[in-house]
Every structure is written in structure tokens, then in C-alpha cells.
Image (cartoon, helix red, strand yellow):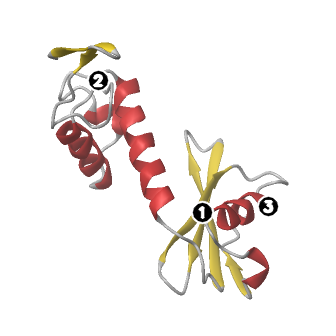
Amino acid sequence: MPRAGCPGHGARTVRTPWEARPSSHLAAPFEARVVAAVMSGATASAVAPRPREADGRTWAALRRAAAGARRAVGCSGVARAGVDDAPRAGRRAHVSVTADLGAGRVAAATDGRDRGAPARPCAQLEAHGGDAPAVSEVTRDVCIQ
């Protein structure tokens, strides 16, 4: 990357238009391609070798994309919620997904099926502008194994 001298701050690296964010190791088009490939059904491990990138960088790009999308979505107005658990990582770990049934979107996604699992989506809902006591109806898919 080109560097420029600044009398007040010293040498600085010039930002390029294709950077995803300051001091990024990955270009914005690459991060977009990773997210698009995973959203179409590919695994992160399958996506990483194509651009010859490490698995960790691919996962980091996905985490940043998910965090950015999560910050952009508000959860106000959730009145009806649906909860479903899905196994992941060899069926030993689970993820709980809480959907806003009125808007047809994900309101919260949390790890685990332990005693604290029901409280975590409520905390996420409230952290993103929702009101957990205002939810009047909750449905849950229960699978006994």
C-alpha cells in the first residue's frame, strides 16, 4: 500500500477504495464473495481454499458480516416469536434461533440448549431495541431425543 507523510501524524498508509475497512488484510469484494458463497450453501472451509486464504480469515469475514447485519436490524415490534433448536458441530452443540413470526425474520440466534438458553434470546431482543415482556405469543419446536 502506498504511504504518505503527514507533518502532524508521521507516515500513514493510504486507504484504497477496495479495502473492507482500515488496516484490512482482505479486500471488500473478497469479503462480499465469501458471504455470498456461504449464503448460497457453501461451508466456510470450502470457500477458504478458492482464494488461497486461511480458514480463520474466512471465518473472521463472516463474523464481521454477521455483526454488521445484526447491528443494522432492529427488533422493535416483535409480538409473536417462534423458537427452534438445530444441532451443529456433530450434533453435540446446538444453536437456538428465535424468529419474529410477524415480520418473518430472525430476531435472535444463540448457542446452547442449557438452562440459560431461554433468557439469552430475550437479552438479545432487548439489546436490539425489542421489548421481551411485549411478546405475547411464543411457539417452540420441541424434539425429544
Tag 3 residue: 119
Local crowd size for mark 2, using a 10 Å CA cut-off: few (<14), some (14–19), many (≥20)? few
Residue extending furthest front? 7
Q: Residue at x 64, y 49 (%)?
A: 94
Kind of residue at badge 3 = Ala
User: In this view of the protein, which residue sits in the foreground, 57 or 117?
Assistant: 57
In percent of width and height, residue 80 lies at: 64, 85
Q: Residue at x 55, y 39 (%)?
A: 89
Tag 2 residue: 25
The answer to whether residue 66 is left or right of residue 54 is right
Local crowd size for mark 1, using a 10 Å CA cut-off: few (<14), some (14–19), many (≥20)? many
Marks 2 and 1, Cα distance to the nearest angstrom? Answer: 30 Å
Kind of residue at badge 2 = His
As helix, strand or loop, the secondary structure at mark 2 comes to loop
**Labels in figure, total:** 3
The answer to whether residue 83 is left or right of residue 29 is right
Q: Residue at x 16, y 36 (%)?
A: 18
Tag 1 residue: 108
The answer to whether residue 72 is left or right of residue 123 is left
User: In this view of the protein, which residue sits in the foreground, 91 or 104?
Assistant: 104
Sequence-earlier tag: 2 or 1 = 2
As helix, strand or loop, the secondary structure at mark 1 comes to strand
Sequence-earlier tag: 3 or 2 = 2
In percent of width and height, residue 25 lies at: 29, 23
